[in-house]
Amino acid sequence: MAGRTQDALYSEIALDLSWSEADLPQVERTKHVHALHPYLGKFIPQLVDVFLRRHFRPGDVVYDPFVGSGTTLVEANARGVHAIGCDISEFNCLLARVKTTPHSAATVELALRATLERARQTTDEVDLRRCSKWLRRWYAPLALRELVAYRRAAELLDDAVRDVAHVTLSRAARSARRTTHYDLDFPTTPVNSAYWCHKHRRTCTPVGEAEKFLRRYTTDAARRIREFAELRTEARVHVLHADACEVDLPARVDGIITSPPYPGLIDYHEQHRYSYELLGLHDLRGFEIGAAASGTAREALAGYVEAIAAAFANARRFLRPDATVVIVVNDSRSLYPRILDVAGLRLEERLTRHVNRRTGRRAGEFFEDVLVCRTT
């Protein structure tokens, strides 16, 4: 879009899908459980809600083959639409499951606070020699003992509350790493000494403890779960930890709303490496589609096209005839005409939305495509 006049550019943008910061502040984009844990690359819930209202009715079933942090599933439940989500990342499935499982906020808060106290009493018993080299490299000794003690204490909880504890632990672990305050998204090397902090405009030191984060996020998790409980409906939600290219869905679906991974942009397993290390999650990064580690060379892009098309082709087996498929993606390489053709999807409408609310050192603006398709 370079070289276009501002008027010409905005004449092609779907303004009803392009909210300004004033119209849609961050507190609304990260409402209730949507901000239970930071997650790169997720689309905003208001965008999902637009297409749920346009193409689905209460009682329908929506599918997201790249469920990520669970945005589609949460918004679908709030509107009474049944939802199925699939992801190759076990952490993503954990997060989506916690967001969409019915919880008692009071029970969650009491259980998490008890877990904090048990962890505090057993922190000194943790033997760091039993922790992985990666963990010992990225965390100060006290912080790592506190995290491991919390993980052990959480094992006494029932499954659903344990999942909440694991997400709380993961969020604390993200904040407690030996990294700069301004680079929590893509740290590459542990920071072990004082540094000039671009976020605080002063000299800062790396974090040395984790308990303060565990306490902060315990309170925040309970609050967010309580807020979503007021919106929750009886609509069913299924979260499948599987490969979208071959998964069998538990029901027929009425359509898809999804935001697939972009080629060569994010390594989704590495993004949450701390969770995999602390929780012992199954690392299936070799099956990630479009991982940053794969790059964007011709061969990598060809593999991306093949895999994304396979995921949508597999989903077609469970879609009703003439189903709507909404795909939110930045298709700057024009890969999706081929993907849609191979997957058996017909493009009905291509909308462009302006996005200008990036955070941290990635601040800037960009454009997304919303592809509204039908099964052929």
Image: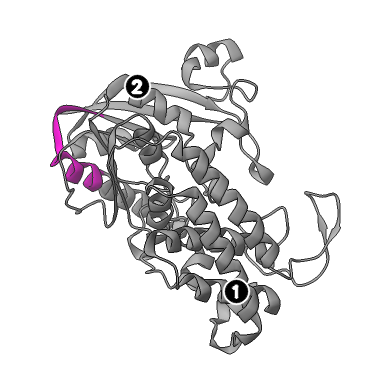
Which of the two discs, 2 and 1, sits closer to the camera?
1
Q: Do labels 2 and 1 touch, CB within 8 Å?
A: no
Q: What's the distance in space between the residues labelled 2 and 1, CA to CA? A: 45 Å
Which residue type carries mark 1?
A: Ala
* Residue 267 lies in the magenta stretch: no
Assign a secondary structure to mark 1. helix
| Direction from residue 333 to residue 256 in the image, left or right | left
**Residue 372 higher or lower than 153, as above or below:** above
- Residue with the mark numbered 2: 53
**In the rendered image of this protein, does residue 55 appear above or below residue 68?**
above
Q: Residue at x 52, y 74 (%)?
A: 153
What kind of colouring is applied to the model shown?
A: one colour
| Extent of the magenta region | 309-324
The tally of labels here is: 2
The residue sitting at 85% across, 49% down in the picture is 201
Residue 53 seen in the figure: yes
Label 1 packing within 10 angstroms: few (<14), some (14-19), many (20+)? many
**Quadrant in which the C terminus is drawn:** top left
Q: Earlier in the sequence, mark 2 or mark 1?
A: 2
Q: Position of residue 102 (x, y in %)?
A: 38, 47
